[in-house]
Image (tube, helix red, strand yellow):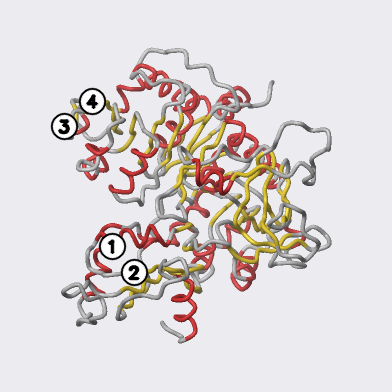
Amino acid sequence: MTESTLLPELISRAACRVPGGVALGYGKAALTYGELDASVRQFASGLLGLGLLRGERVAIYLEKRFETVIASFGAPSGGGVFVPVNPLLKPEQVAFILQDCNVRVLLTSPDRLALLADALPLCPDLRHVVVTDAAPGAPLAQGASVHGLPVTRWSDLLASPPRPGHRVIDVDMAAILYTSGSTGKPKGVVLSHRNMVAGAKSVASYLENNAQDTLLAALPLSFDAGFSQLTTAFHVGARVVLLNYLMPRDVLKAMEREQVTGLTAVPPLYIQLTQMEWPAVINEHLRYFANTGGRMPRETLTLLRQRVPRAKPFLMYGLTEAFRSTYLPPEEVDRRPDSIGKAIPNAEILVLRDDGSPCAPQETGELVHRGALVGQGYWNDAEKTAERYKLLAPDAPGRAPGLQLPEYAVFSGDNVRMDAEGFLYFIGRRDEMMKTSGYRVSPTEVEEIVYATKLVGECAAFGVEHATLGQAVHVIATPPAVDGDQGVLVDTAALAPALLAACRIHMPAYMVPAGIEFVPGPLPRNPNGKIDRKLLASTWVARGAT
């Protein structure tokens, strides 16, 4: 049997090998590979019946459930591109994504569609809405239209007659994953079929995934690492359990109930889990646990290994722009627990100076990723793409002198160093992005929402070290101007609570500031005239603010 080259083939190939094997579990329900493959084909036919053209975008705004997975593979099966939207996002943020990548079809639930009612008129490229089935008589489950857009029920879409999909090859777009941008608005990372399939094969190889594995999908599927749980499992015919958890204890219960063999999570969740008692049976089944989305505290790693001594720890580092990048083999964890490891299979990681030349051992430089996992840039954003996706120097490591065509690589913006044995160590980010609860958050994105409340004059957001979140979002602001004077410090006793309440309405939970401080204006500027976030952050730390 031929190897998978297109994303949906990960499922169809597994369906040929083990049609009766369970692919997905969700609560008490299950889908076999044969059933999942059939549903993917039916969804693709339904999209084609709606007139979806090759390369057009299909947004999925749902929690983890069967329909989310079917649509994620069904859209590219028909020749389209799936756009997973984090279910924690607020309507205005969802609307931005729908606008930014010109979404044609939106899949959501009746309840979520009601929340988006005021945002949909702002999305002129949207042509169809598909809603998951609701109870009989539910107002938006019967079809008709919303704001002039035709609404189709999920069951009706899957009942469409079979239709051949558009021609697709492995370098075509498969997905657009949105990640926060350093200038405020989220950026859509374009990934090809080749990117995602190569990533599945690479990760599955070093995690040694097999058909007997059960992986717990605890991370959002809008995360590259979250979606990777699906692709790596489907590549080997394993089982994935979908979990939308409210409390960390729900994760432990699912691991016990489902006899999970592989768990990938972010440090804040692991920190919470280590504060609980683990059912002993978890250690009997868990084969590995993997960390992504930031450095795991050494104490947390120690506690995890005490909870599940039979499980192998995999410490990973990834870039959405290249899907996955490095991992530290379990046998190296005791020797170098602070390392992010070496390149994953079928990738090469370089440490380069600003002039593009390789750094010497222990010299700090920028982490650069080359190979089959390098994405296709940021959707419709030439400027940001040029900042992150750059041509390698002709004499870069791995490139022979006779090569004539140029090669693009991902320049991560992260400073690292490499030791004499080739192991990498993370130093810090070159920009001002914050990493909180495993999410990359732009300070400008936070500031834009804060300004929109009209409760501040000026503001600056920055990340500060936090024991469980990695970084916490902190905001320093000036009160609204009084008669045009920002230097007047009015009574702010009620301003901070009001601003925090407004943030909770307009921001996903992970973005809400952990601290808000009002000061007299104006805020300090850097030589370019911009508010000096770095100075504010360093001053805040220096005075021991809490």
Amino acid on which the number 3 mark rests in the picture = Gly
Q: Earlier in the sequence, mark 3 or mark 2?
A: 3
Residue identifier under label 1: 451
Distance of label 1 from label 2 (alpha carbons) = 8 Å
Residue identifier under label 4: 150
Distance of label 3 from label 4 (alpha carbons) = 17 Å
Q: Does residue 179 appear left or right of residue 362 in this picture?
A: left
Q: Which mark is residue 459?
A: 2
The image quarter containing residue 322 is: top right
Amino acid on which the number 4 mark rests in the picture = Pro
Amino acid on which the number 2 mark rests in the picture = Cys
Q: Give residue 289's position: percent from left, percent from top.
A: 62, 56
- Secondary structure of residue under mark 2: strand
Distance of label 3 from label 2 (alpha carbons) = 47 Å
Q: Are marks 1 and 2 in contact (CB under 8 Å)?
A: yes
Q: Earlier in the sequence, mark 2 or mark 4?
A: 4
The image quarter containing residue 531 is: bottom left
Identify the image quadrant of the N terminus: top right
Amino acid on which the number 1 mark rests in the picture = Tyr
Residue identifier under label 3: 137
Q: Are marks 1 and 4 in contact (CB under 8 Å)?
A: no
331, 257: nearer the viewer = 331
Q: Nearer the viewer, mark 1 or mark 3?
A: 1
- Secondary structure of residue under mark 1: helix
Q: Nearer the viewer, mark 3 or mark 4?
A: 4
